[in-house]
Amino acid sequence: MFAVELARGMWTTLKSMFEEPVTYQYPEVKRPVRPRFKGRHVLARYKNGLERCIGCALCAAACPASAIFVEASENIDRRRFSPGERYASTYEINLLRCIFCGFCEDACPTEAIVLEHNYEMSFTSRRDAIYTKERLIVPVPPGGDPTPMIVPPGSFDRAIPEMEDPD
Amino acid sequence: MSQALVSLTIDGVEVTVPVGTKIVDAAKQAGIEIPVFCYHPKLESVGMCRQCLVEIGRPKIDRSTRKIVRDKNGDPVIEFGPKLETSCTTPVGEGWVVLVNSERAIEGRRQVIELILTSHPLDCPICDKGGECPLQNMTMAHGPGKSRFLYEDKMHLAKHVPLGDLIFLDRERCIQCARCIRFQTEIVDDPVIAFSERGRKLEIVTLSEPGFASYFSGNTTDICPVGALTTADFRFGARPWELNATASICPHCAVGCNTMLNTRREARSQGRVVIKRVMPRQNEAVNEIWLCDKGRFAHHFASSEERLARPVIKLKRRGRLTATTWENAVKFVVEGLQAAHGAVLGIAGGRASNEDLYALHRLMDGLGGRAVLHDQMAGGEFVQQAGVGPGTNLADLGSGDCILVVASDLHEEAPIWWLRVKQAAERGAKLIVANARPTRLDAHATHILRYDYGVAAHMILGMLHEINHQKELDQYASAETKKVAKVVSKANNVVVFYGSEGLDYAASHDLAQNCATLLAASGHVGRANNGLVAVWTHSNTQGAWDMGVHPEPGGLAAALKGQKAAYVVAADPAGDEPLLTSLLEQVDFLIVQGLFLTETALAADVVLPAQSFVERDGTYTNGMRRVQRFFPAIAPNEGMRADWEILSAVAAAMGIDSARPSAAAVMQDIAAKNRDYSEVNYPALSRNASQWPHVGGKDIYFGGTAHPNHQGLGVQLTPRVERQKDISFDWAAPRKIAHKPRYLMVPITKLYDRGTTVVQSQVLGPRLEILRLYVNPEDAERLGMIDEGEVEVQWDGRKQRLRSVIDEHVPSGAVLVPRSLGVPLATAVDVKIRPIAL
Ligand code: SF4
Ligand code: SF4
Ligand code: SF4
Ligand code: SF4
Ligand code: FES
């Protein structure tokens, strides 16, 4: 009786030695994520380089974890960060508080805040866990200009361009 | 006064209201909400927006008999009109039946919102009003989810139109309700904004130069039902829901407007909590739902970088200020005060709270010295005796009443009082304005009296003559004083506002005394809506008088004579009067407690950093003797302490009194010692009553974004005449004016001066007064002066060059110079003027 059971167990062990492993050898190998995976946020830009975020703080209002802090300032054409009159001069997400629910993404009127695919977040201090605007914002796309930019007067006077790139 | 009443039914609720009440208000009183945009309970109805549509049914009248037609049961037959009607323009009628929430009315209002939204940008995410916006709320509550209008057809208009330095207009957001324009025209009589063009092109333009020149412009942003008007100060400052609110009292003038300080932690300010905006807090007896722009925008001094943050002491020989700990500083103060052996003088300013002033008085008393107020206006004791009684509200004055304003330019000195006095005059109250020069209030006066600077008190005696017929007063009477005296004696209620323009201590004392005597002689003291009000230069000068801290008749120079130590609290005598600097330096030991390193602080041996009114609690007593409480809005920097706390710690260290744990405890001491304040304690100050109109709350469209008052209306003190029947008033023997000086330089008050509490607010920068000497045209010609020329003024061995402006409103023989702009002048002086050739 005992010997049979033992042999069966050994057989299972032996079999699995030849199966393909389901574990990934992280960090050498990284598991791909699903398209709708909710990882660390980024702040998006339009093609021309302008920041999508208009500093409305609706994401902060929607956040159930109070993880977001936004402080807005006024754009002028000689120093323009985003379309319209308002931009986020301070934007911070405390990733220790964030529960990755994506409500901020839903609340955003300009699709500026997006939960991207990066899940590699580890911090050695609480301060490091606070992602500032500089760390969140995506690089300027090719052909675009960095912000703040100088633009001709009156060229970007709508804060919420109808969800497409304002060129 | 009994008013005829009317009963009607609104949505099945029986309501009884006075004749003439608008349906919208009647519904509100019955707890039924009718949405409005253009209607505002403080403004005349215009019926411009159609948002308040309701169905109105009226009892059917038989045309031949003119009787109400009744059905079989004897009930009146109700006839509904074919169309919806605006409830904001329709006064109630007997027996009417109003349907607010009928299907037809709801649909009608829904279509109005749909129409309004066709030309609205819907940029709520970046709109400062978003979150407290009537249009937003109304769209959610009553609007359609979808519009039948084409999105592409929206009008695109300018979004950044400065109407002036303080207010911005977003043309797209304006729903053309004209509340702002009507406020400026009806309420504050500054018709400086108006509609231009028509239809969709309609826009608000400013007619003044500089733009939107009004001391009350900020209020339009509160009552604008959308985010079309925003203030330069708060623009994009924060979302309304992110702000904390703390009740406070405006520290800028004797009105004592109730405010709400909206605060938020700010990254720009290194993570400190800062004041983002000041909002009005409703107190119908003080400021209603308004604030002047100084109260609204001049709050930045409290969060200034220049604030003192640590105690500093100066060891005489080395002469440098060195930072130290509080323990050391207090020890140092105690040693210095002990060495003075009772030859100490406390000097306080009218900005200190009651608790501070009481604590200073207590300390000085214990040391054998005394405390005086740094001010040149007198008469506080007459306000204590004959002030306006509990229940006083300027809004109750109207036809049959009388207001006398003497020696004060209310529009500049106490804007909200100006506003309310003006409104009383519009309701039919007789308004007598007496001043040496024309002021803005003259436009609303029924009687204007002119006198020469310095003899205001004499003129009151002329009026008194008409009432008591004393022979000695004969010489002061004139046809004019006779006429106005009749008005005063005939009036049901009389309130007298007295100021100190052109008057020194003695002259303002006489003026106050004679005004009190006039009021008593004509039977206008000791009851609500009657009495004397002082237009003090600071927010708590009345409180100082009440705490036993008053100015010395001879001024500070006399008071300082022979003193070994001086303790200055919330005042800058050396800054205001450079001649005092040397006197203050001569004192062996000078302690200065305040917010900034002032001229006086520079001369001090110890400088103690005090908390400002936003960091602590305390009370102010306003010019109408209403004691009101302010609360801590911002955590103070560790190095700062409240004035009363420091004084109480010093008193404890010297064995005079035990240290008090809180401002409330100091108020208990005050109540125990001061009969006038016996009813005053912090819980009593926090008492509330329901007020009309409703503001704040969820029906924000009704009254605007002024905050409702949940923190207390304060306590109005009872004047002594109401308690002590034996108080008698006598007029002051008028002083002879020695000679008519060739030119009398008179300091006048302007709202936007360059005092430390104002200059720190950059938004007000462009509006600050510019130092000018105002001269009468004839005098200018005699002196050979030109407009905008330069002159040299000499007085008391001092000289100053000033730019002069020729102004026909200046009385001849006088030259006017605004206070706190660089000419250190407490009261009127004789001057020599010499034009400087260019
Ligand atoms: S994902 Fe959720 S918890 Fe995280 S920041 Fe956004 S709203 Fe907050
Ligand atoms: S990320 Fe979006 S929701 Fe958040 S402040 Fe910016 S624009 Fe507003
Ligand atoms: S700016 Fe505001 S208050 Fe003035 S008309 Fe337009 S919507 Fe009305
Ligand atoms: S009227 Fe006086 S108390 Fe009122 S807000 Fe203006 S300055 Fe302040
Ligand atoms: S028409 Fe009645 S509120 Fe505008």
Image (tube, rainbow, N blue to C red):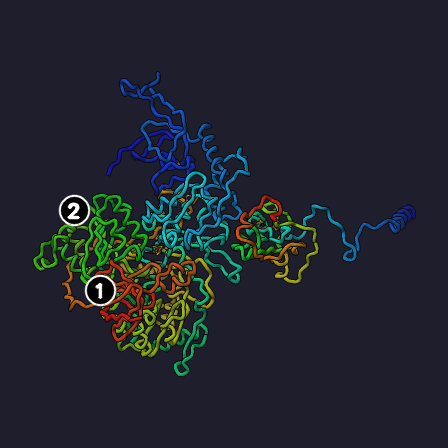
Q: Is mark 2 within 8 Å of ligand 4?
A: no
Quadrant (top left/top right/bottom left/bottom right) for the C terminus of chain B: bottom left
Inspect the image, locate mark 2, and give the three-letter code of the amino acid beneath it.
Answer: Lys
Label 1 SS: helix
Q: Residue furthest bottom?
A: B317
Q: Percent from the top left, x then y, of residue B614? A: 42, 59
Which quadrant of the figure shows ligand 4?
A: bottom left
Label 1 environment density (alpha carbons within 10 Å; few <14, some 14–19, many ≥20): some
Depicted B68 relative to depicted A111: above or below:
above
Residue B61: % across, % down: 31, 21
Q: Verify CB contact (< 8 Å) between mark 2 and mark 1.
A: no
Of labels 2 and 1, earlier in sequence is: 2
Question: Is the residue indicated by label 1 positioned so its CB lies within 8 Å of ligand 4?
Answer: no
User: Which residue appears farthest toward the left when viewing the image?
Assistant: B471
> Is any part of residue B143 visible from this angle?
yes
Label 2 belongs to which residue?
A: B490
Chain for numbered disc 1: B
Instruction: Check the picture and name the quadrant holding the N terminus of chain B.
Output: top left
Q: Position of residue B267 (x, y in %)?
A: 53, 59
Q: Nearer the viewer, mark 2 or mark 1?
A: 1
* Residue farthest top in this picture: B72
- Residue B769 in picture, x, y percent from top left: 35, 61
> Which sits in the foreground, A63 or B665?
A63
The kind of residue on which mark 1 rests is Asp
> Is B134 in front, or is B26?
B134
Task: Give the image quarter of residue B151.
Answer: top right
Mark 1 lies on residue: B779
